[in-house]
């Protein structure tokens, strides 16, 4: 059985999305196990893989990586449907809801750094809202907002820079460089 170039590209995409999900789950899990200097603040390095999927492929790929990371990571950590899971889910969904149109509307002008910074700010805002609703119904929580927003902005910029570097390296890789083989048809794995 042979595959067309389009079928091969879909197989490659699926393989890389699976790799992105696996790496994102690993990073998510390791971050959860490490002590945090300020309770609840983590660098969110797993979001680098979601951003990479967004810029390398499309919004559907980014949503797949993010939602799979949150679900699988929560299953591995044993906190599915806990407040931590809900905070992560709210932050991830809000971040992507901001990053997807930001990337589409801003294009190259905003780039991975700007998209990541916007997503990080949206992420922490959603987490503060959920935390105030679920965990701490006290106005004092909002006094922490400037510190949380500053930390989110810094980590968003760092993650955006890491994403830009990763994208640059991936785009130079033969798999993503659009190099063609001498044949238009490839052997396809059994389905």
Image (cartoon, grey):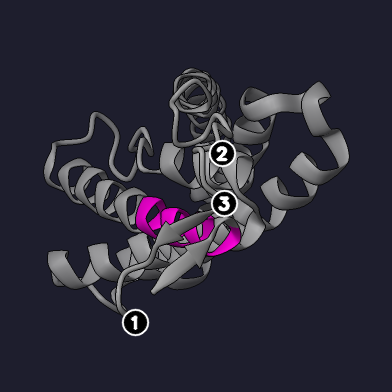
Q: Which mark is residue 191?
A: 1
The residue tagged 2 is 120
Point 61% across, 63% down: residue? 60
| In the depicted structure, whether residue 9 falls above or below residue 31 | below
How far separated are the C-alphas under marks 2 and 1?
A: 39 Å
Q: Nearer the viewer, mark 3 or mark 1?
A: 3
Mark positioned earlier in the residue sequence (2 or 1): 2
How far separated are the C-alphas under marks 3 and 1?
A: 20 Å
Circle 1 sits in a helix, a strand or a loop, which is it?
loop
Q: Position of residue 33 (x, y in %)?
A: 12, 46
Label 2 crowd bin: few (<14), some (14–19), many (20+), radius 10 Å: many
The residue tagged 3 is 184
In the picture, measured across the screen, residue 190 lies left or right of residue 151, that is left
Mark positioned earlier in the residue sequence (3 or 1): 3
How far separated are the C-alphas under marks 2 and 3?
A: 42 Å
| In the depicted structure, whether residue 146 falls above or below residue 53 | above
Point 63% across, 28% down: residue? 112
Q: Position of residue 72 (x, y in %)?
A: 26, 68
| The residue stretch that appears in magenta | 6-17
Q: Residue furthest front?
A: 182
In the picture, measured across the screen, residue 26 lies left or right of residue 18, that is left
Count of numbered tags: 3
**Is-magenta flag for residue 82?**
no
């Amino acid at each position: 059985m042979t595959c067309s170039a389009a079928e091969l590209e879909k197989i490659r995409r699926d393989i890389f999305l699976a790799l992105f999900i696996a790496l994102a789950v690993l990073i998510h899990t390791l971050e959860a196990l490490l002590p945090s200097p300020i309770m609840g603040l983590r660098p969110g390095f797993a979001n680098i893989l979601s951003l990479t999927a967004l810029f390398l492929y499309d919004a559907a790929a980014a949503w797949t990586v993010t939602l799979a990371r949150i679900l699988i990571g929560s299953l591995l950590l044993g906190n599915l449907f806990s407040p931590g899971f809900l905070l992560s889910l709210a932050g991830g969904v809000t971040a992507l809801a901001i990053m997807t149109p930001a990337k589409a509307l801003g294009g190259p002008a905003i780039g991975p750094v700007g998209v990541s910074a916007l997503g990080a700010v949206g992420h922490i805002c959603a987490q503060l809202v959920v935390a105030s609703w679920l965990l701490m119904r006290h106005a004092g929580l909002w006094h922490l907002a400037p510190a949380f927003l500053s930390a989110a902005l810094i980590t968003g910029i760092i993650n955006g820079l890491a994403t830009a570097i990763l994208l640059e390296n991936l785009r130079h890789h033969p798999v993503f460089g659009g190099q063609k083989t001498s044949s238009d048809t490839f052997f396809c794995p059994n389905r």
